[in-house]
Amino acid sequence: MNPEANVGDSAVSIGRFDGRSAVVTGGSNGIGRRITRSFLDAGARVAVVDIAEHDRHRGDERVLFVECDVGDPAAAAAAVEQAVDAFRDVDVLVNDAAAYPDAALVEMPVDEWRRVFDVNVTGPFATIGAFARHRIGAGGGGAIVNITTGSVKSPRPAGGAYSASKAALETLTKVAALELGPHGIRANVVSPGYIDVRGETDAHVDRASDELRASLVSAIPLGRAGRAEDVANAVLFLCSPAAAHINGAVLDVDGGSLAGRFTLEPERA
């Protein structure tokens, strides 16, 4: 049997989301775009919170686009409230929006450093607060998934702001799990490794060179780059009843790249 067979069609098998509504920040491009589509395919309505609208979302009555820079915490909280007003109820929050300008620590301007933390930490803090207040008022329940990165555990040079901010987001998620768990609200993390999002994004499609992509894949035991649907499937699982007793967890979606050292060429290994 081919282990890759139908890997892109597994969202529906995770569970249906008919009658449910989700907020996805950064839902217009990359991983967020695929998460949005997977929720739609599973029957949910989705509020996409982003600075730009994806053309294919236009005219879809199941999609509410909220133009918002989540680095502004007041705007981020208001975006969740707008989704609640439009859908009457929201029971899923996915924080995928991110900023990640690369720079060495001795060269990075303080305002760029702060911008990364505003988007990657303060924005989710604001959306989580707005979402939790809504869910508690509605009687509890709901699921939060924050998207981080394998760089939390394996940082890279020039990625200090991004790695540190996502580490903060993982800790924030665990605190949310502790504080909101008594209300039936679960908070978890999906931590992707190298994900090739070409075909899922209109932004920064040439960010990585072919040489860099090949180097990243060489460090993945499964021997391939991750796909956006791999991350989306993990998100839908954590938001589904199948994950009802999973709270405060970090789910790595990295093909095993963080399992240990993997440096030998396949022939030598």
Image (cartoon, rainbow, N blue to C red):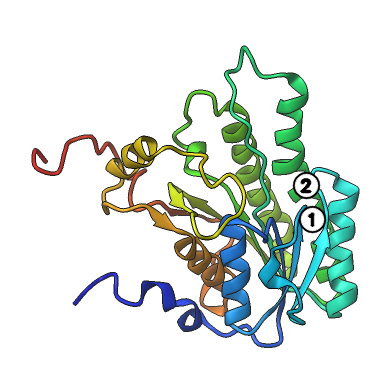
Secondary structure beneath dot 1 equals helix
Q: In the displayed structure, would residue 177 be above or below residue 142?
A: above
Residue 37 left/right relative to 133: left
Residue 173 left/right relative to 77: left
Question: Residue drawn at (62%, 12%), measured in percent from left and top?
Answer: 106
Q: How many marks?
A: 2
Query: Residue 123 bears which disc, if any?
Result: 2
Question: Residue drawn at (58%, 56%), measured in percent from left and top?
Answer: 201
> What residue is pinned by disc 1?
127
* Residue 180 image position (x, y, % from top left): 73, 61
Residue 3: quarter of image: bottom left
Disc 2 crowd, CA 10 A, few/some/many (<14, 14-19, 20+): many
Residue 34: quarter of image: bottom right
Label 1 amino acid? Thr
Residue 194 left/right relative to 25: left
**Name of the residue lying farthest toward the left:** 268
Q: Is residue 253 visible?
A: yes
Quadrant of the frame with the N terminus: bottom left
